[in-house]
Image: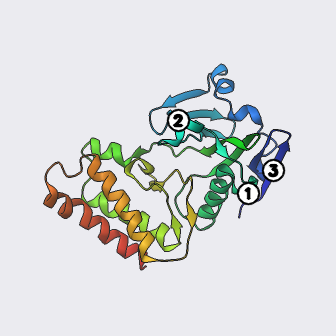
Amino acid sequence: MMPERIQQDAHGAILCDAAVSSQVDDDWFAPDYWRERGALRMQAGGRGGVAIIASPLGECVLRHYRRGGLVRALLGDRYLWLGARRSRPFREFRLLAEIARLGLPGPCAVAARYRRQGLLYRADLITHRIAGARTLAECLAGGDLGSELAVEVGAVVGRFHRAGIWHADLNAHNVLVSAAGLHLIDFDRGRQRAPAPGWRRANLQRLRRSLLKLGAAAAGEQAFEREIWQPLLHGYERALTA
C-alpha cells in the first residue's frame, strides 16, 4: 500500500498520499478556492457534475460524495458516521491504493476527506485526472463502440475480477477510454472480495443493462449480442483465466 498520512482536527480528517501531504489542506476540497484562482472547470457527469482542478500536482478530479435515490431527499449529501476507517472516502482511497499496487488501471488517489456533524458526515475525494479520456457511454453515443473496443472492455473488467475487485456501480459511465488504454473509475462502495461466479456475473449484468439503457441495441438485440456483448464476454473470459 502507498505510504499514507492523516491530518486530523476537531471537525474531521484528511487522508493523503504521504508524498503530497505537506501540500494538501482543506482548501483543496473547496471548489471556490480553485475557482478564485482560475483553476476550476466543471464537466457533466455523475451527480452534480465533475470538478476538474489544476492543482500543483497536475490536473485532478475533485468529487463530492452525493447520495442517490430516495435517501437523498432525507439526508442530502450526508452519511451516517461509523468511524473513520469505515467512512466512504477513506475506504475508496485505500481501495484505489490497492488497485494501484496490483497494477490495475484505476484512478490514482491523492487525498480523501470527511467532515463530521454529530452522527453524520460529508465527504470528498481527489484523484489524478486521466487525460484525454472519454467514457464508454460517450463512445457509444458517438458510434465508436464496436467489437474491437468491446473486447478491450471485457478484458479490463476481467482483470479487475481476477484480482477480486468488485465495482459497486459498473456502468458505461465508469469505464474510461483513452490513448493510454481503458480505466475503471468511481469505486465508491467497491471492495476486494473472494473469487465467486455470483458477484462477477451480477457485475457483468449491471454493465449490460447500462449499455442497453444507453441504446447499444438500437440496431437490434441480435446485432448487440453478435457485435458487442459476445466480443465483450470473449475478452472478459480470456483476461479472467490468463
User: Disc 3 designates what residue?
Assistant: 6
Dot placed on the residue nearer the N-terminal end, 3 or 1: 3
Q: Residue at x 76, y 35 (%)?
A: 26
On residue 73, the disc is 2
Question: Which residue is at the front of the view, 61 or 217?
Answer: 217
The secondary structure type at the circle numbered 2 is helix
Question: Which residue is at the front of the view, 41 or 7?
Answer: 7
Mark 3: few, some, or many residues within 10 Å (few <14, many ≥20)? some
Label 2, label 1: how far apart the Cα atoms are: 26 Å
Does any portion of residue 105 appear in the rendered image?
yes
Image quadrant in which the C terminus is located: bottom left
On residue 158, the disc is none
Q: Residue at x 48, y 41 (%)?
A: 70
Image location (x, y in percent) of residue 105 = 52, 59
Which numbered mark, 3 or 1, is in the foreground of this view? 1
From what the image shows, is residue 61 above or below residue 160? above
Which residue type carries mark 2? Ala
